[in-house]
Amino acid sequence: MAIDREQSVMRAHLGMLLWALIVGASFPAVGFLSDGLPPLLLTALRFAIAALAMVPMVRGREDWRPSLPALALYAVMGLCLAGFFGIMFWAAHRVTALSMSALFVTMPLIAYGLGRMLGVEPRAGGLLAILGLGALGALALAMAQTGGDLAQLQFGWNEVLFFVGCIASALYPVLSKWGLARNLLSKDAAARTFWSLAGGGMLIALAGVTFEPVDALSRMQMGDVLLVAYLGVFSSGVTFWLMQRGTGVLTPGAVTAYSYLVPFVSMVVLFVTRPQLIGWHWLPGSLMVIAAIVTLLKRGSGVASRPVGQTG
């Protein structure tokens, strides 16, 4: 039993490593989309594709149809997704990249704090130290990307709103863990992924229809359609499934800690495409992020909470 538990925890960690690779590689891919396309509607389309990709995995499962309390919880989880993506797109032209990075690296620490408040995160000083190290490393990578220009580090009401979006994003795995611990949500990771994506996608679509020109989607070219389909299946569907699978056996703080790897993966992709940007200024942040993730992996079952059921 202990061996099976240890294996499931390690699979969850490896799955989150894959999550970081997919998400980190997806950021540069978004840059290939044609200019002028409505971001909220594109995200709603991605979520719709991702939810449809989950259908073959959830159809026929015994507990894939949620009860009314579970449906309400999925709606709140979807609101977290919609809130984060909506605010992120709104902040893209109002908040500097460095300020966004500085606020985003607080997300795992926020997830840990919210998890403690809701009783799904055990007290763990070692995990806090890992999260702090990873946050410093990710922030150092953001500084390296801007060439150390501290003038880009700004904090005002726009940054406050983006921070609210980070809180919403951190709350998503916490609510997932809370719902699992109370047997409200499906034990199957694919079912949880489907319903949260469906809920979030509908809310983002509603915001897109309200604030963006729907006819702008007609400017999509075949390359855009294929890229959005790829992002929907992999960058949304697979990554949320991996996160839900990880949430079944890991704590919210441990799951969100892998977001520190995203800028590292994006940096590697940048070096492959533009090797002239390689320099020593990237090294401190890279070493700190790698050290944090390696330490997290070594902790193994030490960061996992008690089992809450099979996650599929």
Image (tube, grey):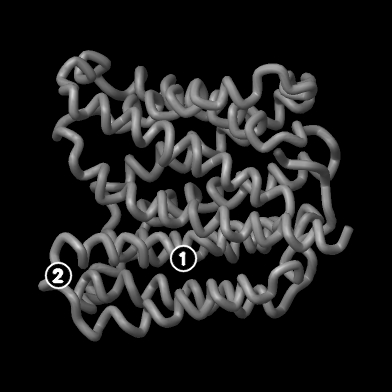
Q: Position of residue 155 (x, y in %)?
A: 36, 64
Secondary structure under tag 1 reads helix
Q: Residue at x 48, y 26 (%)?
A: 201
Please give the label number shown on residue 260: 1
Q: Residue at x 40, y 37 (%)?
A: 86
**Residue 116 appears in the rendering:** no
Q: In the rendered view, tell whether residue 289 sits above or below residue 156.
A: below
Disc 1 crowd rating (10 Å Cα; few below 14, some 14-19, many 20+) is: many
Q: In the rendered view, tell whether residue 257 sits above or below residue 27.
A: below
Residue type of the residue flagged with mark 2 = Pro
Check whether the beta carbons of the residues at disc 2 and disc 1 lie within 8 A of each other. no
**Residue 300 appears in the rendering:** yes
Which of the two discs, 2 and 1, sits closer to the camera?
2
Screen quadrant of the N terminus = bottom right
Secondary structure under tag 2 reads helix
Q: Residue at x 71, y 17 (%)?
A: 60
Q: Position of residue 90 (x, y in %)?
A: 33, 41
Q: Position of residue 33 (x, y in %)?
A: 20, 36
Q: Earlier in the sequence, mark 2 or mark 1?
A: 1
Horizontally, residue 198 falls left or right of residue 215, namely right
The residue singled out by tag 2 in the image is 275
Q: Residue at x 37, y 31 (%)?
A: 43
Foreground residue, 46 or 104? 46
Foreground residue, 29 or 164? 29
Residue type of the residue flagged with mark 1 = Tyr
Horizontally, residue 229 falls left or right of residue 54, namely left
Q: Position of residue 236 (x, y in %)?
A: 45, 37
